[in-house]
Image: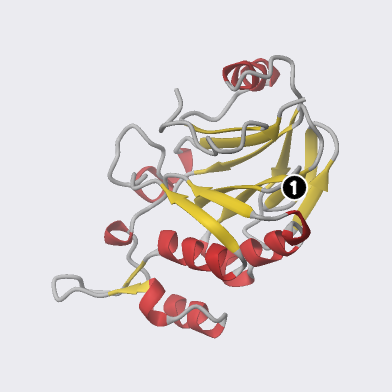
Amino acid sequence: MSLQRPIFADRPLVVAAFLGAEPRGQAAWDQHARQLGLPGAPVARAVQVHGAHAVEVRGGGDAGEADALISRQPGLLVAVVTADCVPVLVAGQGVVAAIHAGWRGLVAGVIPQTLARMAQDGPLSAAIGPCISARNYEVGDEVIAEFVAAGVPEAVVARRDPAWPRVHADVRAVAAHQLRAAGCGSVWLSERCTFADSALASFRRDGPHSGRQVSLIGLRP
């Protein structure tokens, strides 16, 4: 069920995976915990609102409104769900985070704000999971302008092609840029596009009834 090879292989105390289905009910979350080798581990989730708020959690269940969850608790998993937005997992020394980064969250600074709370526990490494690719993410010039106003170089975010009627945004590149700028020395990127890959959920392709991918990370007890 994992979407790619094991990540954070150089961090034996970290368990993490990008998974292909949103759990339905507690039994499904329990199944994901078993898949990661932590049977019975609690899972913390948030009500994602496309903002920049990061919450440090100490137990499983509903963490309220947030788009990033940070944990320093061994045996606890933190999770985000996505369907075109960028899922980011970050690991440091005794700390992990799961980040949901839509374009609004990227503009608002969810990645640098989360990493700022982990900076003292470096070195940090990160993995970016499947998200919509620039080829399939047509936007308006006003969206590119918001990225630029937030400090993202236009060359990082904007993709133009004579065959395209409008500009496209590379949110994967923006996430990688922000991770490195915030001091993340190692950044792994999945090349899978949620829109193009029928095995993945895509809001832009399938509308509000699309499924969700799950991304989880935690520390071994």
From this viewpoint, is residue 76 visible?
A: yes
Q: Is residue 113 left or right of residue 195?
A: right
Q: Is residue 201 above or below residue 70?
A: above
How many other residues sit within 10 Å of disc 1, few (<14), some (14-19) or many (≥20)? many
Q: Residue furthest right?
A: 58
Residue 81, image x and y in percent? 57, 41
Residue 140 visible in rendering? no
Does residue 96 lie above or below 157 as drawn?
above
Total numbered circles: 1
- Residue at the spot x=33%, y=32% of the render? 199
Figure quadrant of residue 155: bottom left
| Residue at (61% x, 35% y) in the render | 216
Q: Secondary structure at mark 1?
A: strand
Residue 18, percent from left and from top: 50, 35
Q: Which residue is mark 1?
A: 70
Q: Nearer the viewer, residue 86 or 140?
A: 86
Determine whether, in the image, residue 161 is placed left or right of residue 92. Answer: left
Position in image of residue 186 (x %, y %): 52, 54
The kind of residue tagged 1 is: Ile
* Quarter of the picture holding the N terminus: top left
Vertical relation: 120 (above or below) 61 = below
Residue 48, given in percent of the width and then of the height, sits at 66, 49
Q: Name which residue lies at 46% across and 30% down.
A: 20
Report the side of 6 relative to 58 (left or right): left
